Each structure stands twice: as C-alpha cells, then as structure tokens.
Image: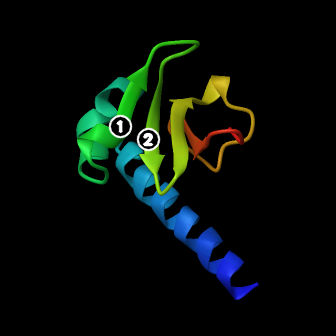
Amino acid sequence: MKFEKYITEAKDEIISKIAAEAGVPGAKLMSLRRPLESIFPKKDIDFVLSPVPHYRIKYKGKTIILVNKKYADDADEVVNNIAIGYEGKI
C-alpha cells in the first residue's frame, strides 16, 4: 500500500510540473514545446496531429498526453484550455 501511494504522489508531481508550465497566461498547446523541453529530454516529446493535435511525452514507461480540453474526457489536470493526463485515461 505504501508503495502504491508513493507512485500516485510521483505521478501527481510530474503532472503538476507540466501544469505549472502550461498555466502561464496565454499559453497555447503549440507554444509548450520549449517549456516541456525544460522538464523532459527532447527525444521523449512528440507533437502529433492525428487524430487531433496533441503532445505525447514518454515518462517512466508511461505516456503523458497534452491535448485541448474539448477533446479530453477524464484529464488529471486542466489548465487554461489544455488537458493533461496519462494515455488511456484522458
């Protein structure tokens, strides 16, 4: 149980870091590349246009998705118009 709690806290920490970068007033999805590169290595960040524009970030064996909130059902965090969550959940 303690281990599961630690994993949940770690996930929330990285989502919070991304949310802090996305929370800059006027931040748009397309303009998040540089702020994301300050958190993750360049090779782990992909911008994909299909089926809708979104970022895919590889992080510790998981994939984090950043997408416009109108395309997200269950995001871990929503900042401005950007939904942030783990693939399969968002």
Q: Is residue 43 left or right of residue 12?
A: left
57 or 54, which is in the foreground? 57
Residue 50 image offset from top left, x and y in percent = 53, 12
Residue 9 against residue 88 in the figure, above or below: below
> Residue pushed farthest front?
61
Look at mark 1 in the image and give the residue it sits on. Answer: 45
Amino acid carrying mark 2 in the image: Ile
Instruction: Quote the CA–CA distance across marks 1 and 2.
Output: 5 Å
Residue 84 against residue 4 in the figure, above or below: above
2 or 21, which is in the foreground? 2
Residue 76 against residue 89 in the figure, above or below: below
Q: Quadrant of the C terminus?
A: top right
Query: Any mark on residue 13, and which?
Result: none
Identified at 46% across, 60% down, the residue is 14
Look at mark 2 in the image and give the residue it sits on. Answer: 57
Residue 32 image offset from top left, x and y in percent = 32, 35
